[in-house]
Image (cartoon, coloured by chain):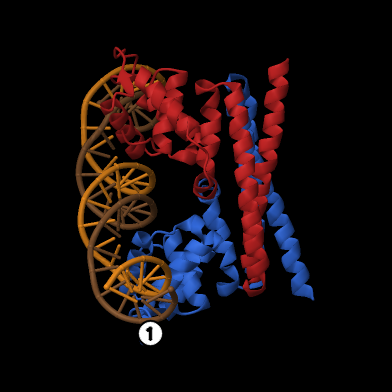
Chain colours: A blue, B red, C brown, D orange
Amino acid sequence: MPGLTALDATLLGLLDQAAQSGYDLRRAFVQTPLKHFSQSPGAIYPALRRLEKRGLVAAVTAARRGGRRRRALRITAAGRRALAAWVGQPLTRADVVWRMDELALRFAFMEQTHTPARALRFLADLEREVRAYLAELRRYRASAAPAMSRTGLLAFDSGVAGYEGQARWAQVAAKTLKQRRSR
Amino acid sequence: MPGLTALDATLLGLLDQAAQSGYDLRRAFVQTPLKHFSQSPGAIYPALRRLEKRGLVAAVTAARRGGRRRRALRITAAGRRALAAWVGQPLTRADVVWRMDELALRFAFMEQTHTPARALRFLADLEREVRAYLAELRRYRASAAPAMSRTGLLAFDSGVAGYEGQARWAQVAAKTLKQRRSR
DNA sequence: CTAGACATGTAACGCGTTACATGATTAT
DNA sequence: ATAATCATGTAACGCGTTACATGTCTAG
């Protein structure tokens, strides 16, 4: 069984919240900040087909309510397991370097698939990995800065600032989760 | 003439700094934070081929210095024009939503292709577009927050914090460029 | 003379994007 | 009757990733 793409996982996560049609899902992508993760029907419909073929989603009795035939989809037990596995993957340095936005998605769906304690561990792992990568970036900056252009250096610093923000966010998010948990 | 991918543009930008071989370029990707933008030879070599076919880069007399044959490449006049056009594209909302990292790249290479005044305009455009998008995100948050899970909301806030950081960075970078310019 | 670093590639595969194509229903 | 909206797709195309395949020079 191959893994899930970020789009696959997002679709599963939304279907886990409520059964709905491909059109509803597409609207959720287009009309909300989820648009960041795709919005073209040429990606969403084929992805749903693949998920159906793998048994991770299934069609529910097609109600037709105005418009054309509606094929509402629901997530299956196997689908929930696949989503949980995707969310719960070990957090690696590679994720931090290449897939930071996917990490945010994984955290967003964590409440649907894991315990709050697990979410806290995710945040601790994230902060650790991000700070380790920050140290690497600062070492690189110290050695390469003299040869870089001004705009090159500023662009680099923008990336560093982004990771610093993520590290801070992980701290604050952990604190928030703990507070809400104790009440 | 089709556009350039981010990888195409990065290769052109590096070759604009110094003529070098595919292997040198690949090393630059693997060993520096450029790794964020790819590192596989299966992407870099085909991209170089395409650029050569389009006349944007050209081989220089192949010196062989240890190892195997080395095909050093240099950027052509057409290549510099293509790079400048890529860097100087109008900055759109779509860039902010889907291609934030490419915007950083464009700014990084801006000193090679444009005047400092143009770099300042880029930063002003960036800040304006990011703040406009932030307003949209906050409107969405206000309406959708009640229905969102705790981790979902926190993940959303991480994205908001990221964009806030970018807006602040654009301000600071502009100030820095102006200072260095007046001295 | 073998191992490893140097240097350049290719083949298979999957996915996403853009652009287009329908068909049905509601509003004017 | 026509336009717009709802709803679901497909086809072409390009690109990137992973994994593999060489060939050459240097160090031990």
Residue A174 lies in quadrant: bottom right
| Residue type at the position of mark 1 | Val
What percent of the width, then of the height, locates residue B95? 51, 44
Residue C28, percent from left and from top: 43, 73
Q: Is residue A21 above or below residue A154?
A: below
The quadrant holding residue B100 is top right
Front residue of B61 and B1: B1
Q: Is residue A86 visible?
A: no
Q: Would you say A77 lies left or right of B164 here?
A: left
Q: Residue at x 46, y 80 (%)?
A: A19
Going 43% across and 59% down the picture, which residue do you hit?
A39
The residue singled out by tag 1 in the image is A60
At 64% from the left edge and 41% from the top edge, which residue is drawn?
B127
Query: Against A4, is B8 above or below?
Result: above
Q: Is residue A55 visible?
A: yes
Is B58 situated left or right of A119 in this image?
A: left
- The N terminus of chain A is located in which quarter? bottom left
SS of the residue under disc 1:
loop
Give percent across and percent down for residue B5: 39, 38
Residue density around tag 1, few if under 14, some if 14–19, many if 20 or more, within 10 Å = some
Q: Position of residue A4 (x, y in %)?
A: 41, 63
A147 or D23, nearer to the observer: A147
State the residue at coordinates (50%, 36%). Answer: B90
A168 above or below A89?
Answer: above
Q: Is residue A57 above or below residue B80?
A: below
Image quadrant where residue C13 sits: bottom left
* Quarter of the rendering occupied by the C terminus of chain A: bottom right
Which chain is indicated by disc 1? A
As drawn, is A91 to the left or to the right of B52? Answer: right
